[in-house]
Image (cartoon, helix red, strand yellow):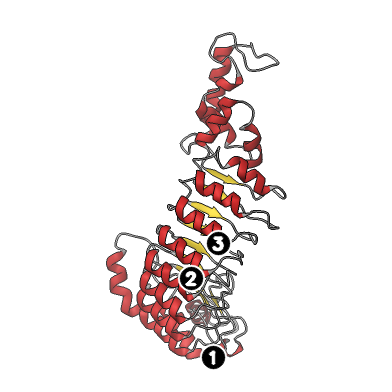
Amino acid sequence: MVGKDNLKTEDLNLCFEKLMMFGGSGIGKGGAKMEGGVITEWKDIPMELLLQIVSLVDDQTVIVVSGVCRGWRDAICLGLTHLSLSWCNKNMNDLVLSLAPKFTKLQSLTLRQDKPQLEDNAVEAIANCCHDLQVLDLSKSFKLSDRSLHALAHGCPNITKLNISGCSAFNDHALAYLAGFCRKLKVLNLCGCVKAASDIALQAIGRHCNQLQWLNLGWCENVSDVGVMSLAYGCPDLRTLDLCGCVLITDDSVIALANECIHLRSLGLYYCQNITDRAMYSLAHSRVKNKTSIWESMKGMNDEEGLKTLNISQCTALTPPAVQAVCDSFPALHTCSGRHSLIMSGCLNLMSVHCACAFHAHRTASTFPHPAH
């Protein structure tokens, strides 16, 4: 979790060999004193070597090691960029309060909880001390209020990836406020944030977070076409969007996404029962319409164009011809076992829809006559 990427295990072994070569056998019980005068105490281990050693242990051990001596604490505090405290089952709030002022160079922090522990003062401490933070996971933090989002807006404007799924106490105005400051957001998980994920918040995200590529709005039942269309027009680089359980959206949302988000790769419409064939045909036609612009914007890249995953489970108003048109337009959508990326659970009337693999398999089988013939 910490250390320099360009250091390898071989480098670590070489460092140890050199230490032993220069130091001889003068390692005492109370420290790492060596006769050669190269290293007099454990605290004198080179920072690069210490960080490489620390990178091989878990985050809980890293915290313990940082308390061995001042030299180690300073080295780890300067070098630690990624930290996860998800292992902490109790007193996480106090732990964050004590660590935030020390680990000021953090770029990624995971605080996922099985039971709610974090409170607003811990998030405020993070925002006040960790200004380089880019990735933050606060999922299932049921105790947090809008104070936390306001603190992050002012203290951590460089966040690119934020997970607040399950944080049910946040409201939409606080999320809209955050969007106005954290304009570099690329990944945002709002699954289950029923109060926060509203059309007001999505309009703010579409207005300010134009780099957004991944968004989960699962079970945010207050989201309507107004919010989704704002996203489509404001976030043209959107790649993944999960709208499962967003029961208010209609074909208008899908049509806007098909026309504006030409890089869209994954779309979740589970239980969006207002979706009809009109939405499916708009997706199918968008492949032809956007093919030229995709090619111009992606020359020299190997990224396969078009939808790769589509979940229309429980969208019972859809008919086989419309869904087959989508499947035919996007070769990466599969209904065959092992490559199931067009998901249609609960839609018994769509059982006749098949990807190209099924037709190729049938054609291959027909090419070779039965041995009896």
Q: Of tags 1 and 2, which is closer to the observer? A: 2
Q: Can you tell which mark lies on residue 146?
A: 3
Which residue is most to the top?
35
Helix, strand or loop at disc 1?
A: loop
- Front one among 316 and 101: 101
Q: Of tags 2 and 3, which is closer to the observer? A: 3
Q: Can you tell which mark lies on residue 38?
A: none
Residue 249: x percent and y percent? 50, 82
Helix, strand or loop at disc 3?
A: helix
Q: Can you tell which mark lies on residue 317?
A: 1
Helix, strand or loop at disc 2?
A: strand
Q: What is the number of callouts on the image?
A: 3
Marks 1 and 3, the one that precedes in the sequence: 3
Name the residue: 68% across, 57% down.
Answer: 116
Q: Is residue 280 left or right of residue 99?
A: left
Q: Is residue 204 left or right of residue 125?
A: left
Marks 1 and 2, the one that precedes in the sequence: 2
Q: Circles 2 and 3: CB distance less than 8 Å?
A: no
Marks 2 and 3, the one that precedes in the sequence: 3
CA separation in Å, label 1 and label 2: 21 Å
What residue would you read off at disc 2? 241
Q: Does 194 sit above or below residue 314?
A: above
